[in-house]
Image: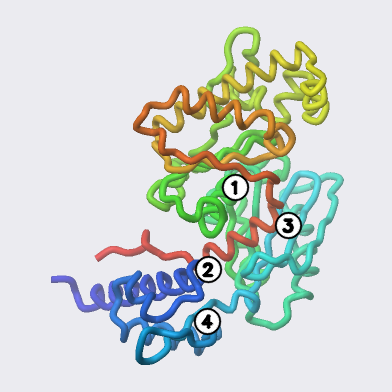
Amino acid sequence: MPLKSERTTSNKLLKSINQQRVLRLIYTDGPISRVELAEKTGLTQQTITNIVNRFLEDDYVLETEPVSGSSGRKPIPLIVRSNEMFAIGIEIAVKYIRGALIDFQHRVIKEFKIDVPVYESKDHPLDFVRQTIDELLQHVPKTGQLKGIGCSIQGLVDAKQGAVIYSPGLRWREYPLREKLESLYDLPVYLENDANLLALVENLNGRLAGSVNNITIKFDYGIGGAIVLNNQLCTGATHVAGEFGHYKAFAGKYLHKCHCGASGCMTTLASVSGLKRNGGYAIETFGSLLDAGDPQAVALFAAIEEAAGLAISNLITIFNPDHVLFTGKLVDVLGQRLLPLLRNRIFATIPDSCKGVILEHLPITPDESTLAGGLVINRFFDVPLESFSM
């Protein structure tokens, strides 16, 4: 028999989980009635009423106009007060700090950017981050409406511990960024690597909202990725799961040394930086040469498409996702030419058991500061299942 204190702790956590499940449903499926919430959660009508009353008291939820029912009392749909809750998102880059204040409808209220010539010490980036946050705070309508600060970082991030494991351009190694920001602002602070962040936001209410198992691949200055299995982001033992840029994809005359120490990595030619460094082409120039039918550019493009297509086919075969999402600057510029070819190659090479996969893409890569704000929204509605044990 569990001790009384253990039962009390479990009951409190279960109550918290139920509340978060209901709040998330109101946010994602609203307007939604109490009856529908009970049906979707399996909770009793009284439990739903108690939870909703708490949300109404805390001004998280708003009752809308009753709708006509078949008989009896008209259901009152509920929505989250998403236009009265706000988040700050910060993109921490090597040459600039960009911030955005957004509401919980993902509308941008205010943007701010600081260009940085060089970071002189490990704490120097924090000075610019503070300037950006302080500017955005002036545009929050009321104290208490700001629900947190999210940070997007290109580098290795331990999101659970709130630390930047390694980001050489920022002079950060094992840097406790969350601890420093929370001590300054007394708000929840969340950190994430840029590709994981995009996947989290798209899974909450974007193109992956109906997905359970998915892969996101970002063909950008480097190549990043994220893996979501059973609605949970998989970060791996050392927080580098989804680093698809280091999938070994090239051989022969297209074999190049990668900054990771190995050779043939997908990022050596299929990323914007790799295309410039090893192929000799800026991405916009490369697109123009392809339009003109330049033989060398066409041959290199064919090698990139084949390598990327086969690599993605293997990933689909291994992970069996229901969706794969493509994004990044390379997709922004070359997507109309590249994506149809990738689709054909992928479906020609994956096994029949995986051919239900849906391939999606974002026509324009989202701004990372707004994505970082979206991280706050995602965490606000998160269900703390990993903390639950009976």
The amino acid beneath tag 2 is: Phe
N-terminal of the two: label 1 or label 4? Answer: 4
45 on left or right of 359: left
Say the numbered circle drawn on residue 193. 1
N-terminal of the two: label 3 or label 2? Answer: 3
| Label 4: few (<14), some (14–19) or many (≥20) C-alpha neighbours in 10 Å | many
Residue plotted at (71% across, 53% down): 91
- Toward the top, the furthest residue is 252
- Report which quarter residue 138 is drawn in: bottom right
The amino acid beneath tag 4 is: Val
| Label 2: few (<14), some (14–19) or many (≥20) C-alpha neighbours in 10 Å | some
* Residue that carries the numbered disc 4 in the rendered image: 61
* Residue that carries the numbered disc 3 in the rendered image: 126
Residue plotted at (65% across, 52% down): 152
Residue plotted at (38% across, 26% down): 351
N-terminal of the two: label 1 or label 2? Answer: 1
Where disc 3 sits, the SS reads helix
Q: Work out whether residue 386 or residue 218 is closer to the camera in this orientation and state it.
A: 218
Q: CA distance from mark 1 to mark 2?
A: 18 Å
List x then y, in percent, for residue 117.
Answer: 86, 45
Disc 1 vs disc 4: which is toward the camera?
A: 4
- Toward the left, the furthest residue is 1
* Residue that carries the numbered disc 2 in the rendered image: 380
Where disc 4 sits, the SS reads strand
